[in-house]
Image (cartoon, grey):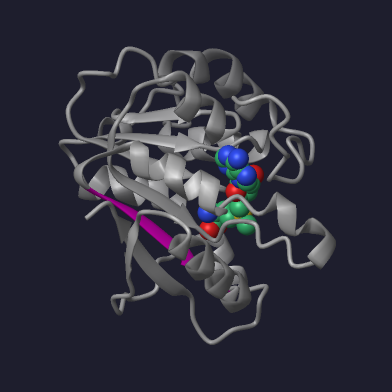
Amino acid sequence: MEKQEIRTFGRRHGKKLSPRKLSLLANILPAILPKNIENAGNLILEIGFGNGEHVRDLAIRNPESIIIGAEPFMNGVAALLSAITTESDNQIMDEYKRIRIWPDDVRKILHDTNLRFNEIWVLHPDPWPKAKHEKRRLLNADFLNLLGTKLAPHGQIIIGTDHWEYFDWISQQVKKTALCASFPPKSKIHTRYAEKNMAGTTEPKYMILTNQ
Ligand SMILES: C[S@@+](CC[C@H](N)C(=O)[O-])C[C@H]1O[C@@H](n2cnc3c(N)ncnc32)[C@H](O)[C@@H]1O
């Protein structure tokens, strides 16, 4: 990660984890860190996956792809691990075997690897609504430019948020980059924050960014 990058996420740890989740973090997570995947074929990245509902959907909908989920909130990481393993013997279920988890700030893995992604998803990024926190917004022009350099040919960045003011702010940031934006009508993608709808809007808005 570049030195001095400002923190874009809230807590790293929440309420106490169950013994099962602690065991999954200790024993399963190390085996599914995103290592040795440079030549693994189609790669999909989800940034800030929360509890990982959409990472699981991606794995099911893209059986030929490796799905990397990045999330520094360890309770979210543990929730995803719990959902992709069997309770009886903590084995990863077949349909989720292509999921890899980066349990940290996504910017570290982006700066430290040469991975190229066919899709990069960012759903309900933290909106940091107070003016004094605006600098914590992840989807600023610099970060969007970085994502653009990490796309495979014809790759896409898909962004969705119910926080319309942040959506408009991101659209303004895109104008300062070399990326092209389109705003296709998209049916609501189910994630925990889409359901929470803390912004109180009628629906999330989505945009797709490409290098062409
Ligand atoms: C509002 S939550 C949304 C979670 C999920 N996408 C959803 O829709 O339910 C935003 C998530 O982004 C994560 N996040 C913020 N900055 C990040 C970063 N630099 N790298 C990876 N994840 C980040 C936070 O930890 C948080 O879990």
Residue 62 relative to residue 46: left or right: left
Residue at point 55% right, 26% down? 108
Q: Quadrant of the C terminus?
A: bottom left
Span shown in magenta: 155-162
Q: Is residue 123 left or right of residue 151?
A: right
Residue displayed at 19% across by 34% down: 42
Q: Quadrant of residue 75?
A: top right
Q: Residue at x 27, y 51 (%)?
A: 211
Give how far across and how far down residue 146 sits, in percent. 45, 40
Choose between 27 and 206: the one closer to the eye: 206
The spot of residue 131 in percent (x, y) is 80, 66
- Say left or right for 125 vs 28: right
Up/down of 175 relative to 163, above or below: above
> 120 or 211: which is nearer to us?
211
Q: What secondary structure is the magenta-colored segment mainly?
A: strand
Residue 199 lies, with reference to residue 46, above or below; the image says below
Instruction: Classify residue 11 by image quadrant.
Output: top right
In the rendered image, is residue 11 in sight? yes
The single residue placed furthest to the bottom in the displayed view is 202
Q: Is residue 158 magenta?
A: yes
Q: Is residue 180 above or below residue 142?
A: below
**Quadrant position of residue 114:** top left
Residue lying farthest to the right in this orientation: 132
Image height check: is 141 above or below 107?
Answer: below
Residue 177 in the image, given as x and y percentages of width and height: 43, 55
Count of labels in the image: 0
What quarter of the picture does the N terminus occupy? top right
Q: Residue at x 72, y 40 (%)?
A: 7
